[in-house]
Amino acid sequence: MNHTKTYYRRDILHHNQTFVVEGPLSGGDLSHYTFDEGLNAFRRPAEQFDAIKEIADLPEGRIIICRDHSHIIAYVTFLYPDPLERWSEGNLPFLMELGAIEVSLRYRSLGLGKEMLKLAMLDDQMEDYIIITTEYYWHWDLKNSGLSVFEYKDVMKRMMEAGGMEVFATNDPEITSHPANSLMARIGSRINNEQIDQFDKIRFMNRFFL
């Protein structure tokens, strides 16, 4: 796959405050910024900052951020699926995963997640990929949101739809273990039928196709 990365930037005005949405950025680019302490959903902020810098420098890795001046307040990651998960079966070079999306607590409800996803999909190279995201309710900040698990699911679904993603069925045990979990994907416009068939076989592993 061609992993050339084309940089995009948008300025988002909200109540006389301007936020910058930009990417993909390299690890070196990210090092010029600070990382918000509220970005702690997956690990401690300093460790997560190191992790996204590492992802940024992978050949396929893409990091989109939203920043307040030089302070990162949100990010989204794209990379190949985790080798330990079924989505890496066959090492399909056209299958990319939206690995994480996080917005710091005090900047939520501003639509920044949607803006990052929209910017990520501006790159024409995304048309060469099937991009998946696995939504698990145990990753969600239900405590601070005040939402029920299904209300939060609706919020996540609408955000992902802003990036052109839609719900796909699967028999993956982790996803089917709870009705709030889901698989969403965006099929690039240059993905062919053979590639879609390969994706379908991963979605429904251990099931006979007639």
Image (cartoon, rainbow, N blue to C red):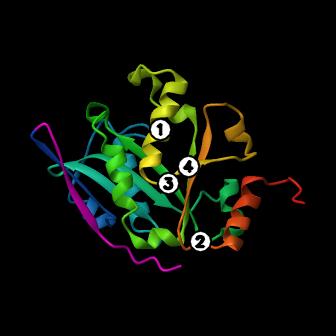
Residue 191 is marked as 2
Residue 166 is marked as 4
Residue 98 is marked as 3
- Please state if 160 lies on the left or on the right of 70 as rendered: right
Quarter of the C terminus within the rendering: bottom right
Question: Which residue is at a point 53% across and 69% down the rendered structure image?
Answer: 189
Q: Are marks 2 and 3 in contact (CB under 8 Å)?
A: no
Image x and y of residue 29, in percent: 26, 65
Q: In the rendered structure, which amino acid carries the disc numbered 4?
A: Glu
* Image quadrant where residue 89 sits: bottom right
Task: Decide whether residue 150 is among the magenta residues.
Answer: no
Image x and y of residue 201, in percent: 76, 60
Q: Earlier in the sequence, mark 4 or mark 3?
A: 3
Q: Are marks 4 and 2 in contact (CB under 8 Å)?
A: no
Mark 4 secondary-structure assignment: strand
> Relative to 92, is 10 above or below?
above
Q: Label 4 vs label 3: CA separation?
A: 13 Å
Q: Label 2 vs label 1: CA separation?
A: 25 Å
